[in-house]
Amino acid sequence: MAYLQIAARLKQLRMERGMTQAQVAHHVGVTRSAFSAYENGTRYPSYDTLISLAHLFSVSTDFLLCVDNRHFVDVSGLTVEETAAIKNMVNLLRSKK
């Protein structure tokens, strides 16, 4: 069951970014067939590959492993004011639900 949840999450993230399996595989240093196996739920990525995938997709490893459903946004390089504006926007969007 866990394989299938991780597989679905990887496919969702890849498709949201308009990437091919080959492109993702190249970015994280595995073969396309290895990444395909991750997406098909027949194989787990190694710890190093999992971390590379998290960086590529700007999510946490917990999110990839379906332990946590929160997305993370990389705010490195932004000012304190810009980061605060992003937090305010997220809070505003949450309050509309």
Image (cartoon, rainbow, N blue to C red):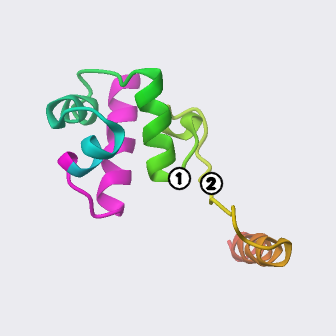
The amino acid type found where label 1 is placed reads Ser
Chief SS of the magenta region: helix
Residue labelled with disc 2: 72
Q: Quadrant of residue 63?
A: top right
State which tag comes first along the sequence, 1 or 2. 1
Q: Is residue 12 magenta?
A: yes
Q: Amino acid at mark 2?
A: Phe
| Discs 1, 2 touching: Cβ within 8 Å | yes
Magenta-drawn segment: 1-22
Quarter of image, res 2: top left
Q: Which residue is mark 1?
A: 58
Is residue 28 depicted above or below 19 in this figure? above
| Front-lying residue, 76 or 46 | 76
Taking the magenta stretch, the answer to whether it contains residue 18 is: yes
- In percent of the image, x 18 and y 47: which residue is there? 22
**Residue 78's spot in the image, x, y percent?**
73, 71
